[in-house]
Structures are given as C-alpha cells and as structure tokens.
Image: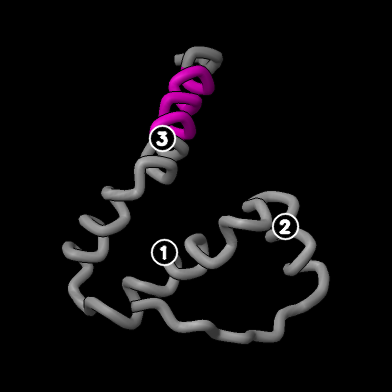
Amino acid sequence: MQKKLTISIDEMVYLGLHEIIGKRRISKFIENLVRPYVIDKSLVNAYREMAKDDVREKDALEWSEGLIGDINNEKM
C-alpha cells in the first residue's frame, strides 16, 4: 500500500529533480534513496535491494566501465 507524502525542498533541488530524474519518477527515486535507512538496517540487504534496480545497476556499470578509459591514458 502506498501513502502520499508532502515535503518541502529548496527550489533549485525541485527543479533539478524535474530536469534530471523526470517528473513522473521522483517519488520512486526518493523512495529508493530512503528505503535502506528506514526499512532494513542491514547493509548487505540494502545493497541487495539496490541491485534489484535495473536502471541504477545499468548506470553504475556504465560509470565503472568509463573508468577503464581513464587508465588507458595513464603512463606507467
């Protein structure tokens, strides 16, 4: 069961959420950020929950793969 929550945030944060996260995805984004802190105190279980988020995992993989290119330019 979902509940509605009204929060107040800085205008710049609000605009950034709309621009970066998207208007219809903000609730899920905030829920995913907050969930590990209020539902499950176990770090391992929190990481398992985050791993279920396909978009987050895709973004993390792209980020980590992007680091490989940085090393290729380093002199050893």
Residue kind at label 3, given as amino acid type: Lys
Type of amino acid under label 1: Asn
Q: Secondary structure at mark 2?
A: helix
Name which residue lies at 74% across and 51% down: 19
The answer to if 33 sits in the magenta stretch is no
Give the color scheme: rainbow, by chain, secondary structure or one colour.
one colour
Q: Which residue is mark 2?
A: 18
Query: Chief secondary structure of the magenta span?
Result: helix
Q: SS for tag 3? A: helix
Which mark sits nearer the N-terminus, 2 or 3? 2
The amino acid marked with disc number 2 is His
Which of marks 1 and 3 precedes in the sequence?
Answer: 1
In the image: residue 27, left or right of residue 54: right
Magenta residues, as a range?
A: 61-71
Choose between 26 and 71: the one closer to the eye. 26
Q: Earlier in the sequence, mark 2 or mark 1?
A: 2
Q: Residue at 35% of width from left, 49% of height from top?
A: 53
Where 20 falls versus 69 (above or below)? Answer: below
The residue under the point 55% across, 85% down is 5
- Residue 74 tag number: none
Is the C-beta separation of discs 2 and 3 under 8 Å?
no
Count of picture labels: 3
Q: Residue at horizontal 31%, vertical 55%? A: 50
The alpha-carbon separation of the residues under discs 3 and 1 comes to 15 Å
Q: Position of residue 37 (x, y in %)?
A: 35, 78
User: Which mark is on residue 32?
Assistant: 1
